[in-house]
Image (cartoon, grey):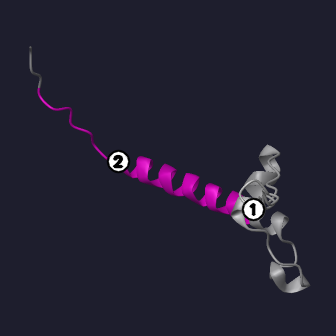
Amino acid sequence: MLRRKPTRLELKMDDTEEFESIKKELENRKRQREEVACPSGGGASDGEPHPLRADVINERIGFKPTPKMAAPPTFFGNL
């Protein structure tokens, strides 16, 4: 197997500036999504509790868990 020398990467000022601008854009988008999700700012300040993460996932996939009912008593052992 042939070995080659490791590739050297140079970090330039243009690269760091581009990274910072992209990072700010993503943060702004995230902040806007959060504002749209809860426009009141407080989230649960309107009196409604936030749904649990499991409830949100179950609703999204259409799973409706129902509690299992206790089995009716059997009379075979009591005779």
Camera-side residue of 68 and 71: 71
Which residue lies at the image location 78% right of the left edge and 44% below the top edge?
61
Camera-side residue of 49 and 33: 49
Label 2 CA crowd tier, 10 Å (few <14, some 14–19, many 20+): few
Q: Is residue 1 above or below residue 15?
A: above
| Magenta highlight range | 5-31
Q: CA distance from mark 2 to mark 1?
A: 85 Å
Query: Can you identify the residue that label 1 sits on?
Result: 78
Q: Amino acid at mark 2?
A: Lys
Where does the N terminus fall, quadrant-wise?
Answer: top left
Q: Secondary structure at mark 1?
A: loop
Q: Secondary structure at mark 2?
A: loop
Q: Is residue 79 above or below residue 49?
A: above
> Image quarter for residue 37?
bottom right
Residue 41 pos. (x, y %) = 81, 79
Q: Amino acid at mark 1?
A: Asn
Label 1 CA crowd tier, 10 Å (few <14, some 14–19, many 20+): few
> Image quarter for residue 2?
top left
Q: Majority secondary structure of the magenta segment? A: helix
Left or right relative to 7: residue 18 = right
Which residue lies at the image location 9% right of the left edge and 21% below the top edge?
3
Residue 29 falls within the magenta-colored stretch: yes
For marks 2 and 1, the one nearer the N-term is: 2
Which residue lies at the image location 79% right of the left edge and 73% below the top edge?
50
Residue 59 pos. (x, y %) = 82, 53
Where does the C terminus fall, quadrant-wise?
Answer: bottom right
Residue 71 falls within the magenta-colored stretch: no
Camera-side residue of 48 and 77: 77
Query: Can you identify the residue that label 2 sits on?
Result: 12
